[in-house]
Structures are given as structure tokens and as C-alpha cells.
Amino acid sequence: MTSLSWYICLAAIGPIIAAYSIYKKRYIYKVSTLIVFYLFTAAITWFGEFTVLGLFDSYAYKPGLFSDPWAENLFAHLLLNTTMFPSAAILMQAYSLGYWGMSLITALFVFAEYLFVRLGIYEQHWWNYCFSAINVVAFLTISGKWFAHVRNATRRIPRFLTFYFVGFIIIHTPAPILLLMSKQYYKLDVVNDFVGNTCRSSIIIIFSYHMVEVLLLVTFVSILGKWYWKLVPFIIAIAGHSMLARLNIMVLLNGWKLIYTLTLYVICLTIFIFIEKYTLRPDQKRSNKGTV
């Protein structure tokens, strides 16, 4: 098997498990709630990966698809952290797995890392297996505690935090994909000089930018409930990215146009507003079989 095949096989396991768990427990938990929880936990892993890998270069993925090592890291991060960790969180909550279940999942994650190291398709820098085990346990524990807030996200702060992370993963997704497709990248001299790699500096720039943008998005959509406030995030996205392009912070490549990027963000904003409006709402008259 090629390096990429190992990554694809590992990534495929997660969605299969998550989809099966959501299907089997659809009469106990709302499908929409489990999907929101999946997105929430995936976003948590993105923040963690941004810190330990993007900022501190803790390890290196080697799927063998790109010549740029940070493009390799970015691709593998998107592939694995959007599948493995949230699927494990879904499995834990759907079947109410306890400490033994957590221990088994942790062992499987550490074994997968060990296997990839032995195959030469993953490399640890200052990171080690102990950190991986602690990371998985902490992730499953925190996500498990938060699941109760997701199921009953009627209070303002839990709802705001839940949709902040959900909004982040929806809004941020186009940026790394377009970067990997060589359609656009981001540059700031102070970041580029410090990091020394275009792909890595691009992610640091746009990730940080989206952290602020999504904060405004959720404020206008979730906190300020009037319909007209929901128009403000569209104005912010269009004006903000247009300004990034005008200042040459966002650089377009290979025939890609600003209007294409703006269209993607409008679509993502619409998806988020739809999710925020129709999910995590208190039940009025829910049957014993539940509803989506």
C-alpha cells in the first residue's frame, strides 16, 4: 500500500463508525444534534492541531501527495482530524461508553500512530505517544462533558460556544482546500519571515482571521436574533475578503477570481445560518421515537 492509501483507509473508518452510530441511535438522539456535535468536535480538533502542529511543529504527516511538507501536514490534518476524533466522540456518546471504552479508543489511536511511525509515513518531533494518549483522553472527556450542553443548548453561553466552533469549521473549510488546490494563499511579511513556509504562514494568517470573523458571525446570528442582523456577516465576509485581496494579503492564482471565493463564503454563511436556525432547539412535542 502507498502512504496515501494508509491515510485514506484510516480516515474512512471514522465516518463509517459515525454514520452507523447515528443511524442506530436515531430514535434516542436527534440526528441533527449528533451532526452538530460531530462538527463541534471536529472543530475542537482543528484548534488543537493548529496549536500543536501549526504553531509548534510537533510532528509531521507524510501521505506522499505533495512536495511541500506543510501541504502534506495540512492535507493529512484535514483528512484525519475531520474523521477520526469526531467519530470517536460520536461513538462514545451514542453508546454511553465508559472508562473501558475510552481506554480502548485511546489504545487504538496510539497504536495507529505507532504503526504510521513504523511505516515511515508519520514522524514525531518533540511529540511522543504519551502526549497522544493524554490528548485522546482529554478530548473524549471534554467532548463528553459538553455533549449535555449540545443536547440542551438553550442557554445563551453554551449555545454561543457550540455554534462558534460549528461556524468556524464551516467558514474556514474553503481556505485550506483552495490553498491545497493552488487557487489562493495568504501572506504577511511578519508571519512569512517568522515561519518561512508559504503554506504554513497562510494557514496561520487565515485561521487567526477566521477566529475573529466567526466571533462576529455567531454574535450577529445567534445573539442578535432579528433577521436583519443576519445580513451583517455577509457584509463582513465580502468586505473583509475584498480588503484582503486589495491589500495583497490574499493572493489569487491560476485564474481563480475573487468572486469565486466570495461565492463560497456566501454559501458557507447560508449553510451556517440554516444549521443555527433549525438545530439544537428545545422539543415541543417529541414522540418517543424522536425527530430529526
Image (cartoon, rainbow, N blue to C red):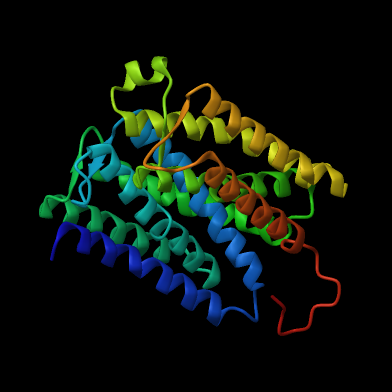
Q: Position of residue 256 (x, y in %)?
A: 44, 43
In which quadrant of the rendered view does residue 185 lie?
top left
Report x, y in % for residue 290.
Answer: 72, 80
Residue 225 in view here: no
Q: Quadrant of the C terminus?
A: bottom right
Taking 132 as reference, is 97 left or right? right
- How many numbered callouts? 0
Viewer-closest of 164 and 29? 164
For residue 34, above or below residue 85: below
Q: Quadrant of the N terminus?
A: bottom left
Quadrant of residue 244 within the rendered picture: top right
- Residue 2 visible at all: yes
Residue 217 position by quadrant: top right
Give the residue at the far front of this rendering. 255
Is residue 47 depicted above or below 154 in this figure? Answer: above
45 versus 214 height, above or below: below
| Side of 59 where 290 appears, left or right | right
The front one of 280 and 188 is 188
User: Is 23 left, or right, of 202 in this rendering?
Assistant: right
Q: Position of residue 96 (x, y in %)?
A: 53, 69
Q: Position of residue 16 (x, y in %)?
A: 41, 74
